Amino acid sequence: MDVRARLRPVIIAAAERGQALARRHNWLPEAPIPQPGGDGTPGDGTPVLNEHGLAGIDAVLHTLRGVELSRMPQVEGTMLSAGCAGSLYFRWIESSYGPVKRHIGVEFYTPKPDDLPPGVEWVKSTVADMQGVEDSSVELVYSGQNFEHLFGDDAVGFLLESRRVLPPGGWLVIDSPNREITAALTWTMPEHTIEFTPSEAADLVTLAGFDVTSIRGLWLCREPATGELYPRWSEEGSPLPAEEIARRAAMASFHPDYSFIWWLEAGRADREPDVAALRARHAEIFAQAWPERRNRLLSAVGERSHEDGREIVSVPAGIPGCPLFGPYMPFSPGHYRATFTLRRRGKAASRGRLAVLDIADGQGNVLVQHPLRAGDLRPGEWTQASIECDVAELTWGGQFRVNCTGAAAIDVIVGVEVEETGTSVAPSALRDSAG
């Protein structure tokens, strides 16, 4: 049976946390929902190979991550996976890395499988509080495509807990998408809070009491010599030539800053972690990255251009549709206020609705909407309009949207000002200062 077919249950489990909404809303063709994952997560049965070779970006990333697993430091005792879903995850690790005498899986959001392989222990806990795992009892901690999912202080907690369960010289290995590339590509995953750059990850790991030994890249997305940005795959979604796949895969290892995924390996040092500096650095990174994350906005209609240093999307009269939507972000419980900036061009065909602003949750339910009529948008003038609502339960893939009716030509500034009150995504240091 094909490896991807055998790993299908992994993605079924992950779907409980966000897959359905992607299919419901027909995201971009390269939308990074686990089909098989967008970030190299083992997949849903899509063939790894076709007549042209590797079938697409997901197959490439999955293959490259498997190669890096085989290169991880070999240990004879205990390995811990921080974040795992389904028993076949552990078989994927074994097939790529090799047999592990004792494998601890720390997972909070998905249920314990009934058919765990021999030698696997399941710990239902968050990675920021690894209850039941003794001090210095693990030789290798692996966090695969999990670091970018962590809320609040959990990223700091995970690093400190990793140091606790590892002895001096034990290994910490993390792979995660690179924000320098995801932001440039306007790539979004509904369960991600923020992604980190390779240098930011190295800063945090070092402050947590580790010595970074290697940072490598997986899948080149920016040309080192020229700075040219490449799409994640081919522009049309057609197969890439084998030579290009080989070049981008091989070059990435030397250029993590220009790669879609970074792969970091670090040894646990004897020195104590600088907890205060670690928390401060994490808060600094989040304060910079979260506003950008909330503004990975897409357009279904209209043409983008620049005016006075700002990016705008212009929709002609007679064209209905959504000039601004996204960013498919986590909505944690709390209060949200979103402010858009729009401009009407010329006369309106009617006195009715010209556009509708809304906030939608991860299931596509409209939480609040506000219509804009001709009197709300004076021709030739930029106008700010705000909507706000409460979110009662955690949901993935939240959106801030502008929908044009076609009754007038509308310009929209590509960006939304978001104010959050009482939410839990930010580190406590930022929440406390905001309060």
Image (spheres, rainbow, N blue to C red):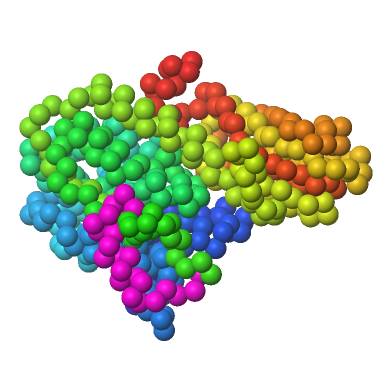
Residue 380 visible to the viewer: yes
Q: Which residues are magenta?
A: 237-261
Residue displayed at 15% across by 52% down: 102
Quadrant of the image containing the N terminus: bottom left
- Is the residue 38 above or below the residue 196 in the image? below
Q: Residue at x 69, y 34 (%)?
A: 341
- Vertical placement of 184 versus 34: above or below? above
- Taking the image as drawn, is residue 105 in sight? no
Position above or below: 345 against 101: above
Extreme residue in the right direction: 350
Q: Percent from the top left, x then y, of residue 306?
A: 62, 45
Q: How many marks?
A: 0
The residue lying toward the viewer, choosing from 376 and 275, is 376
Q: Left or right of 231: which side holds 417?
A: right
Percent x, y of residue 178: 36, 48
Given residues 435 and 116, the one toward you in this image is: 435
The residue at 28%/41% (across/down) is 199
* Percent x, y of residue 135: 13, 34
Comparing 224 with 368, the one in front is 224
| Residue at 65% in and 41% down | 307
251 relative position to 150: left or right: left
The residue lying furthest to the bottom in this view is 51
Q: Residue 279 appears in which quarter of the rendering?
A: top left
Q: Is residue 413 magenta?
A: no
In which quarter of the view is residue 168 placed? Answer: top left
Q: Position of residue 107 (x, y in %)?
A: 32, 45
